[in-house]
Image (cartoon, rainbow, N blue to C red):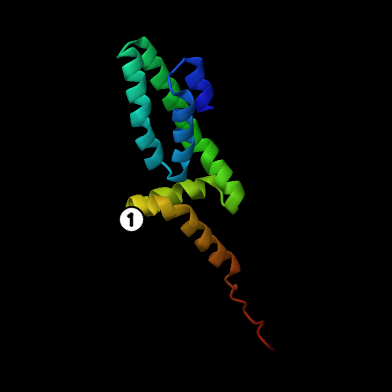
């Protein structure tokens, strides 16, 4: 999707920047932030701070917001059998505790916790004998 946006606006190095954006999904939120820097630099060097720069940057931010807050949690939820909201909460929780490492390991940790809670035997009460 990002590639299509970059091609539409005729941004130089569209393929390379789109690949970098795609790889940035590996580290949620932090990767998207880091890859924004080269996208902004290429757009600035191509157009300056004109209306084309603003249009590309707004389109890029919209794609990133939709990707990071809807598409990625939904895809990860299908892969690890967790609700998308649980994934977002895990990223915020573990990221708040352990920073970048927490964000990186949030989904595996949430999956582990979910598996343990699912496999944990429930307490069974024995019926009272009369």
In the rendered image, the vertical position of residue 84 relative to residue 112, given as above or below: above
The quarter of the rendered structure image containing the N terminus is top right
Residue drawn 32% across the image and 18% down it:
45
The kind of secondary structure element at disc 1 is helix
**Residue 54 picture location, percent across and down:** 36, 16
**Front residue of 71 and 118:** 71
Q: Position of residue 10 (x, y in %)?
A: 47, 15
Left or right of 10, for residue 79: right
Q: Position of residue 59 (x, y in %)?
A: 45, 21
Pick the quarter of the image with the C terminus.
bottom right
Residue drawn at the location 46% of the way across and 15% of the way down: 9
Nearest the eye: 44 or 92: 44
Identify the residue under disc 1.
98
Most extreme residue toward the bottom is 130
- Residue at screen point 50% across, 18% down: 7
- Residue farthest to the right, as pictured: 130
> Residue 89: horizontal and vertical position, in percent?
44, 49
Q: Residues within 10 Å of mark 1 (few under 14, many from 20)?
A: few
Closer-to-camera residue (82/40): 40
**83 and 128: which is toward the camera:** 83
Instruction: Note whether 126 is above or below 110 in the view shown.
Output: below
Tell me if residue 46 comes above or below residue 25 in the rendering: above
Looking at the image, which residue is at 38% across and 26% down? 39
Q: Residue furthest left?
A: 49
* Lateral position of residue 108 relative to residue 94, left or right: right
Counting the numbered discs, the total is: 1
Name the residue at the top extreme. 51
């Amino acid at each position: 999707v990002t590639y299509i946006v970059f091609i539409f606006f005729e941004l130089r190095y569209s393929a390379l920047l789109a690949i970098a954006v795609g790889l940035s999904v590996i580290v949620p939120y932090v990767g998207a932030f880091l890859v924004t820097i080269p996208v902004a630099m290429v757009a600035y060097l191509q157009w300056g701070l004109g209306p084309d720069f603003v249009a590309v940057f707004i389109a890029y931010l919209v794609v990133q917001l939709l990707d990071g807050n809807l598409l990625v949690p939904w895809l990860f939820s299908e892969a690890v059998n967790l609700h998308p909201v649980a994934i977002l909460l895990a990223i915020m929780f573990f990221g708040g505790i352990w920073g970048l490492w927490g964000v990186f390991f949030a989904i595996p940790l949430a999956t582990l916790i979910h598996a343990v809670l699912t496999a944990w035997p429930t307490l069974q009460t024995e019926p009272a004998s009369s």
